[in-house]
Image (cartoon, rainbow, N blue to C red):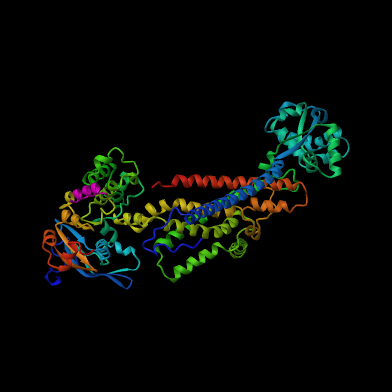
Amino acid sequence: MLDKMAPTGTSHKMSARDVRVFYGDKEAIKGVSIDIDMDNVVAFIGPSGCGKSTFLRAFNRMNDTIPSARVQGDITLDGENIYSNAMDVVQLRARVGMVFQKPNPFPKSIYDNVAYGPRIHGLAPNKTDLDQIVENSLIRAGLWNEVKDRLSESGTALSGGQQQRLCIARAIAVDPEVILMDEPCSALDPIATAKIEELIHALRGRYAIVIVTHNMQQAARVSQKTAFFHLGTIVEYGDTSNIFTNPREERTRDYITGRYG
Amino acid sequence: MTTPPPPNSDPARKTDWMGGVMQKRIKSRYAAEQRFKLLGLGAVALSSLFLAFLLFVMVGNGAKGFITTEAELTIDLPAVTGSISPDQLTASRLDATLAAIDVRRIFDIAVEAQYGEGSARFFATTAWTALRNELTENPNLVMGKTRFWLPTSSEIDRAAKDRSTPQAEADYALLRKAGEVRQSFNWNFLTGSDGTDPAQVGIWGALKGSLITMFITLILAFPVGVLAAVYLEEYAAKNWLTDLIEVSINNLAAVPSIIFGLLGLAVFLQFFAMPRSAAIVGGLTLALMTMPVIVIAARNAIKAVPPSIREAAMGVGASPIQVVFHHVLPLAIPGIMTGTIIGMARALGETAPLLMIGMRAFTTTPPQGITDPATVLPVQIFLWSDEVNRGFVEKTSAVIIVLLVFLLTMNAVAVYLRNRFETRW
């Protein structure tokens, strides 16, 4: 698989080459390579503990916060290695936004939740601009109509699904290039999940989106490309339609048909 | 009754939930719970009883400390001083006039006239200054005959409130025969300072000393403690050195306070040659003692902030310092405040370390600044409880009441602030 891929950089939004992630002595990701493109939603699927979340967190260096974690290999954003010393990690995390498994709005008002990112990065020169950014982000996250009359209420008072869309609004308020979603619907009910999936469809094209999911139907619904992880490696990566209808690997077929996982 | 076989040992046999053995077991479980509840209730009742007893005794003994005994003294001023023209009583000339007529002499004459030879001992040694103050406030009294209420000596004071020596009781009887005696609120106790006459002492000097010392302790211990906690939690590498620092801080919080006094003596007084008995040194010493408590509380509060909030902030590109100041600290503030309240309350009640740095000075004027000789409320309690004069007993209880009120006020303010900062989830 590795030798078929183009060298690092070129036209891909993000590329990973032979990435290894260690927790202490344990190797959680064993030499994974993948390319992420602008116009696709990429889904990472695989059984629990296969390393898909760990790999996802390598794309915006969230693993840096875990003292025992170590990352080897190259991950590039627009051809630039994000693990080089020249890369500013604060700016990287603004360009590569993240939505977490459990909705985690700040215990602040809805407005302040969305405005926080633009404020710390100085994206809005004045209040009018900031208002505009907040409104646009909430509209794009499909939450505006539900909260426009109560922007000063606490973000934690919203329902779970609304909280998760608020977190998406917060992520897109800083105008990232890539959005990483780590099982964004695992704590939500089916209706809220459907809303988030619609949202992912709407956001596609404007942002490169990588989504980790346990739910294979969800991967099939929202993604154009799917990577199947198993025991710290990518078993198969290709068009979602192929993976689900005609997988090349037996392990992929077994997982998709529910033999394990 | 035979012991039933263990459950599921016989697949055909089902657990008999309604059987006598099971019912008995349930009953004994409820009984155990009931016993535990009663035990807890007993513990709460016992501690409430002790608290009520403490308050009852303190208020019972101390309330009299806020009351002073005054005796009536009628003075016909023009008869003693001759006539004084009104223009001698203008603001600019009043002091000179009062000096010329010699208020102390007038006082002595009036006392002898009303109560007989040698009766000056009925009044406090400073009674004539009280007379002078009244004349200063109301100069027109010089022009006529007036009844003044002047503080009695502490023996008479005690005889009036309680029992005293036979001599004082006899004096009190004499006083009652020749004039009137009344009891009034002792404002001097709240505005005055330490002294030798228990009837004339006040706690403002010690209270102000406590206020200044606590202020210095707070502005040093709080920021340093919180910053140390933030650094240790957020920035310090997890290695043996950090572990060593953590163990040291935990041990420091348990060091007996008198040892901090010795440290303050050696470092601040001897090495840095700071002024003895001063509030600044007391504040520094108590800050050293309070800081570990704040560090430990702040670290626990910071640890308790959910990691998801940190991740959320980092996920939108907040720098580590922004994560700390925008998210972690605001959420940790209630916990930090709780630790600070505990530390400050302990510092407020501390006597031993302050004795080591000389804050047991006999100061008859309140401190005017952080380098003036000062004392604090607990040390004042210690000093007065050691006095031979029986009149200090009620004063000691009264200053304990003031200390407790100070403590409760400080805690109430802190709790109010903490609740205001509390973020609802």
Farthest residue in the right direction? Answer: B117
x, y percentage for residue A118?
Answer: 28, 49
Q: Using residue B421 as the reference point, say whether residue A57 is left or right of it.
A: left
Estimate the x, y position of residue A13 in percent, counting from the top left: 17, 60
Image: B142 above or below A130: above
Task: Report the predominant secondary structure element of the magenta stretch.
Answer: helix
Residue nearest the observer in this picture, B356 or A187: A187
| Residue B341 or residue B305, whichever sits in front | B305
**Relative height, residue A108 to residue B224 (above, below):** above
Residue A237 counted in the magenta span: no
Task: Determine the residue positioned at 16% across, 66% down.
Answer: A236
Name the one closer to the observer, B201 or A113.
A113
Residue A80 visible within the image: no
In this rendering, the answer to whether A217 lies above or below B75 is below
Between A65 and B154, the one lying in front of the other is A65
Q: Is residue A195 magenta?
A: yes
Start-end of magenta stretch: A189-200
Q: Is residue B213 left or right of residue A104?
A: right
Where's residue A167, x and y in %?
Answer: 28, 50
Please, which residue is most extreme toward the bottom here? A25
Q: How many marks?
A: 0
Q: Is residue B355 visible?
A: yes
Q: Position of residue B172 (x, y in %)?
A: 83, 38
